[in-house]
Image (cartoon, rainbow, N blue to C red):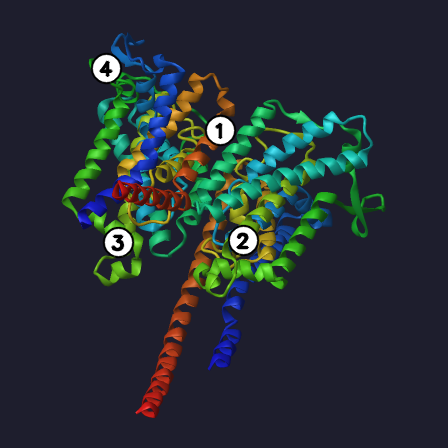
Amino acid sequence: MFEKKNGAALRTREPLTDTQMLMFISIGIFAAMYLAAVLFMGGGFRKPQMFFDLLNDNAALIIISCALTIVMITGGINISVGGVIGLTTMACAIFVNSRSGESGTVSILLTLLLALGIGLGFGVLQGFLVARLEIQPFIVTLAGMFLARGLTTILSLEPVTVSHEGFQALVESRVKIPWLGYVAPNGNLIPAKIEIGAIVAICVVILMALTLHNTRFGRNVYAVGGNPQSALMLGINVKRTVFWAYVISGLLSGLAGFVFLMHKPAGNASVAMRSEMDAIAASIIGGTLLTGGVGNVIGSFFGAMILATIQKIIFLSPLNASWWQDMANGAMLCFFILLQSLILMRRNNSKTAGKLQKNLKIHKADKTTEGKEEKHET
Amino acid sequence: MSKKKNGSSGLGQLLIPLIALGILVLFNLFRDISFFSITMRVNNSGNIVLAGNLISIIDNASELAIIAMGMTLVTAACGGQDISVGAVAAISGAVLVKVLQGMGGITPVSLLLGFLAATLVTILFKLFNGTLVAVFRIQPMIATLILFSCGRSIAYWINGDATPQLYAPIIDSIGKTIPGIPIPTPIFAVLLMGLLLILLFRFTSLRLYTQSVGINQGAARLNGINPTTVKLISFVILGVCVSIAALLGVCRMHQLNHKNLLVDIEMDAILAVAIGGNSLGGGKFKLIGSILGAYIIQMLTTTLYAMNVNPVNIKAYKAIVIILIVVAGSPVIKRGLTALWKKLRTNKAQTEGVN
């Protein structure tokens, strides 16, 4: 009897493919959008560099999308990521400037540690408040956002530009791809360049995807988000899982702040304003549900890339205005949200129908066995 | 017995906001007693008005309190929050100004028409949110993220980049004070909205329906309540609240700035709902708690201003106080405190028994 039930649980993997469908839709839309841009916009989009520029400009967004995806899978939310980016860039800019006499590597490593430390601090605090004290994640991370933004302005109201030479060398360093590029009018091949931040972002996406899919912790995160009660019954430490999800989220937002500083070497109080909403949008477009239990880091990556592509297309089109961009983002979000809801409704309907039948069958089986036992007793 | 239990649980919900308010008041009493002084002074247009920190707290919190009321209903019915209120308020203000410009002047009639048009448009936008939430079953926060990200751009689209200035006696009497009445008008708007909602709850079953939908939608549906309608009604009421708040905001500033009108009010409104002891997961709610929450947030801000904290740094201090309030109100601390209280009482009873 028990083995049978396990078998059934293993077989019901179809919902996973259903949510993967959301991810594939977003990948498809990204590909279609990029192809359309290449065909109709031409110009910059014909060069491979454009694709890498999308990565370079949005490395921080990609990282915080991952940070949001993991807490959204647990059924929570983290809107402090943008604030933590702001605080990290400001603190790191001030810190690295104060060590201007030192060699590059040491001070860069120390700055990275500072960035991760700030992120870790926020992650631990928020994780503790959400997991142990059971306060609503929205309020906790809202307070976290206020705290981060306020601390940023306390550190400095004026923008702080990084003047440390070693760090500037890091900012200007690029990885060249020799076999990919475009041929300049004079016949030279100009290779495509990737910033270190973009490579970090891609590594984060891959690492997070592997963690979520192949480790015990990752599976626990999905279980806790899907149904905390059953996760608890299965012996999963729900509080610890939620706590670590927030810690990872905070750590990633600290890393995103460092990556942001590598892209734009200046600390500014208004940096990454409202980027948390962009990250939430990216996660949703990538197929993560705010209700928890469903989501995918790779989807979030493509969600962020879709937002970035829209931004680039509108920037290069005659409609170059921030409000057109907002409208396009809104329309895109609306489309994906409706799509998700329709897919989920269909899935829920088929799922409940299936469940009902199974329940009935089990019920019958139980009754018959009960009856048999009773007979035996009599 | 059951009646007593209900009463105690109701007070329990309001206990944290009341204690927070009390601590803020005590803190100000010890810090500087003149914080509470209320004076009569003559304002720029020659009317006698009340002035003082207390009046400015209650006055400035009006928009927040009104939106918090609507937010409470949406939270209770849908188990989620509407984060597009600030953006939709900008749209509402833009429509109001558009109508005023189209009518060619600010008169009471044109203002009324403008307000009605703005309310209608706001309700339509809120119904868009409501449809996504109630019919398509999308999480409220995500459904309203759409208008959150493009609402202010729609306001821009309606009215262009201009920040139209509005100067007229009627604007002054709505945003500041009516000549002859020393109390700022926005306070009356809060009272009016509160009274309307109380009457609505008194004479209809809306409160019961909203709570039952919020607690268990399936059970509510089986009992003959239509969850879709209840959720849509909550969004319509929020739309009216947003429209009134936008009118007050435009009249207070004498201008429409689509970027700054009621900016970030969605976060404060959700905070007000949470500080008031309402569950953000829906279900039971107390309007008075949210209103108290709004005044606590404003009082905190005003206190920090009075302590000469730089306005841009206020967010950090605010965050610390908010964390303290929500930690004090958290379920774990509550459980611990009630356990402690029971232990103390049993100990006391035992010692009394021994004596």
> Which-is-in-front pick, marks 4 and 2?
2
Discs 3, 2: same chain: no
> Is disc 1 in contact with disc 4, using a CB cutoff of under 8 Å?
no
Residue B236's label in the rendered image is: none
Q: What residue type is labelled 2?
A: Arg
Say above or below: A201 vs B192. Answer: below
Dot 2 alpha-carbon crowd within 10 angstroms: few under 14, some 14 to 19, many 20 or more: some
Q: Name the residue under label 1.
A: B315
Question: Is A211 on the left or on the right of A18, as rendered?
Answer: right
Discs 3, 4: same chain: yes
Question: Is A349 on the left or on the right of B346, as rendered?
Answer: right
Q: Name the residue under label 3.
A: B212
- Residue B271 appears in the picture as rendered: yes
Say above or below: A135 vs A209. Answer: above
> Which-is-in-front pick, marks 3 and 4?
3
Mark with earlier residue (3, 4)? 4
Q: What residue type is labelled 4?
A: Pro
Q: Distance between the residues labelled 3 and 4?
A: 42 Å
Q: In which quarter of the image is the C terminus of chain A?
A: bottom left
Residue A240's label in the rendered image is: 2
Q: Which amino acid does label 1 sit on?
A: Lys
Say above or below: A335 vs A169. Answer: below
- Residue A293 appears in the picture as rendered: no
In the depicted view, which residue is nearer to us: A32 or A235?
A: A235
Q: Distance between the residues labelled 4 and 2?
A: 56 Å
User: In terms of secondary structure, where does tag 3 sit?
Assistant: helix
